[in-house]
Amino acid sequence: MRGISRSGIVAAFAAAAAAVIVVAGQQPESLSVTPVKDGLYYINGVGGNVGVRVTSEGVILIDDKFPRNVDGIKARVAEVTDQPIRYVINTHHHGDHAGGNVGFIDSADVIAHENARKNMIRNEQDAPPRIVYTDQTAVHLGGVEVRAHHLGRGHTNGDSVVYFPDLRTVHGGDLLHGTAPFIDYANGGSSQEWLGVLDGILALDFDTAIPGHGGLMTRADVQAFRDQFVAVRTRMRELIDGGLAKDDASAEIVTAELSWTTAENGLFMRRSIPGFYDEVAAER
């Protein structure tokens, strides 16, 4: 098989195997549950990280991945508790975070910011939350308090930051990302206002953060995430001031000093740049 590398052959076989699994109706990925702190876990795998807060009276989930992941999420929760899932808090409307609502909406209370519900309805997604809030809300269950804060526009216009005050931990949804952020301008996202949201997160008393994707973050990691956001915005502004054309922005913003701009699998470069260019240009 001349002209095809060994890695290419392996990738082709892997893709074929994955296709067979999908056709067979099985989940094409596995989920694992990881302890964060006492009574708090997160479920990772393809799709957004799911927070699992266990109490003596039931479980509070943060996000629920895709519809195909519902059974897997329930199985992973059952590994750490026999309590039922009582509440689901959606950090935002995207299908890899709220798609699993279809498997929980009839047995649990699903909660989100009012704009997340509006986005789900406008985008014709199934099982939008029946309970919404504006600025902040809280769930009290089994002596545990879990707070949800809407701190402004960022990833979308309907993001929730979920705070576990007794554990000094936050779940940031896609406001925090292990690789690179995606600014969803079509659903109200904003890089400028995202900085204020990050300031709001950093104003909370926490030492651990669960991002929407990737591994656990420290407070210092969240600060570094904010610092890179400032640096990327500064670079775009300087390029625009130097005469950068919009069509060239995706290529010209790349620099080894900023990992977001070089992230091979990051959403930032692939999807955010046109809107990011327009937003920064309008601030001049």
Image: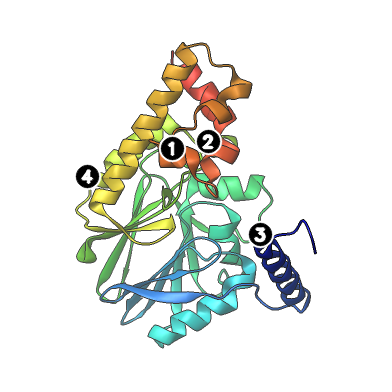
**Can you identify the residue that label 4 sits on?**
203
Colouring mode (rainbow / by chain / secondary structure / one colour): rainbow
Q: CA distance from mark 4 to mark 3?
A: 34 Å
- The label on residue 188 is 2
**Can you identify the residue that label 3 sits on?**
126
Helix, strand, or loop for circle 1? loop
Q: Earlier in the sequence, mark 2 or mark 3?
A: 3
Residue count near mark 3 (Cα–Cα under 10 Å), binned few <14, some 14–19, many ≥20: some
Quadrant of the rendering where the C terminus is positioned: top left
Residue at horizontal 42%, vertical 53%? 178
Question: In front: 77, or 27?
Answer: 27
Q: Do residues under tags 2 and 1 come within 8 Å of each other at their CB atoms?
A: yes
Helix, strand, or loop for circle 4? loop
Residue count near mark 1 (Cα–Cα under 10 Å), binned few <14, some 14–19, many ≥20: many
Q: CA distance from mark 2 to mark 4?
A: 23 Å
Q: Earlier in the sequence, mark 3 or mark 1?
A: 3
Amino acid on which the number 1 mark rests in the picture = Arg
Amino acid on which the number 3 mark rests in the picture = Asp
